[in-house]
Image (cartoon, helix red, strand yellow):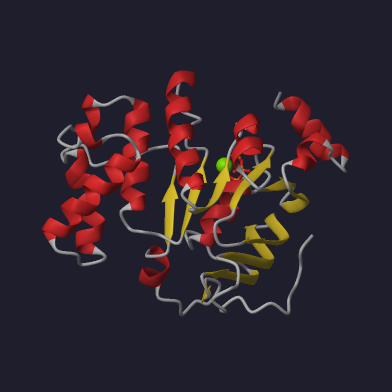
Amino acid sequence: MDNNTSANPAGSHGPIVSLRRVRKNFGSLRVLDDVSFEIAPGQVASLIGRSGSGKSTALRCIDRLETVQDGEIFVDGLPVHDPALELRSLRLRVGMVFQSYNLFPHLTIEQNIMLAPCKVRRIEKAAARDLAHHVLAQVGLLDKRASYPEQMSGGQQQRAAIARSLAMQPKVMLFDEVTSALDPELTGEVLKVIEGLAADGMTMLMVTHEMGFARRVSNKIVFMHKGRVWEEGTPAILTNPQTEELSQFVKSEL
Ligand SMILES: Nc1ncnc2c1ncn2[C@@H]1O[C@H](COP(=O)(O)OP(=O)(O)OP(=O)(O)O)[C@@H](O)[C@H]1O
Ligand SMILES: [Mg+2]
């Protein structure tokens, strides 16, 4: 485990995301137990592990949807664990996409995407529309910009949700099982979009059960078990697990 506490997380060459000895409890249940890992600029990391191992909680702590009991989390130098942190500055840096798309049904895709840049980043409408077109082209949905969510497939809605996050021009994208509600053919088109972002150099942390995808696209794997980082390394750890737990997990996911 990389536990280099002498690194300066606020430095421009430091990691985009850094967790140090993070502890998180829900009541008496310890869900994150001494969790430490880092994501460097441009790195694509996959967070894997059995159900209940703490993957979603880790992502939610990075975006401060949950607060931690102990330890430190830095995002682009911002101390996320600090109760005084201004959340707006964090939200400008982190894009998060979930299994559910949460698009506004009464707005077109273009309007859905323009909303946050206008309200949160206070960008002019015309510039926000240009931005919306740019990110829609990135996810292959420019021709759907005037459609309403219900007129699109699940895969298209998820790609629109990704575009909505991209429009905020985040420093890091967090994906939590974004394809698990989709049919296999729709899963493929969403994974292709994520793969494109990886190729463009976007820093990403994704929770995924798509092992083949994780192996192909990510350059870092973090395997969590019982709230701990059990194994961590390049995708090679999936073919050569050092622990019985990862070995079992890889077999179960085949
Ligand atoms: N808001 C909450 N209140 C209480 N317990 C919670 C809460 N959220 C999560 N937990 C518990 O924390 C543990 C870790 O949950 P988490 O959702 O992080 O797991 P996960 O690795 O994402 O699992 P999955 O693969 O099923 O999504 C589980 O035991 C879960 O029941
Ligand atoms: Mg989860």
Residue at 68% across, 64% down:
23
Q: Is residue 128 above or below residue 73?
A: above
Q: Quadrant of residue 127?
A: bottom left
| Left or right, 82 with reference to 26 | left
Residue at 60% across, 33% down:
213
Residue at 71% across, 51% down:
227
Q: Is residue 21 above or below residue 215?
A: below
Quadrant (top left, top right, bottom left, bottom right) of the N terminus: bottom right
Looking at the picture, tell me which residue is in the foreground, 140 or 20.
140
Looking at the picture, tell me which residue is in the foreground, 77 or 139.
139
Quadrant (top left, top right, bottom left, bottom right) of the C terminus: top right
Residue 52 seen in this snapshot: yes
Q: Position of residue 49 (x, y in %)?
A: 69, 40
| Left or right, 168 with reference to 203 | left
Residue 102 seen in this snapshot: no
Q: Position of residue 160 (x, y in %)?
A: 31, 39
Residue at 83% across, 34% down:
247
Q: Quadrant of residue 147?
A: top left
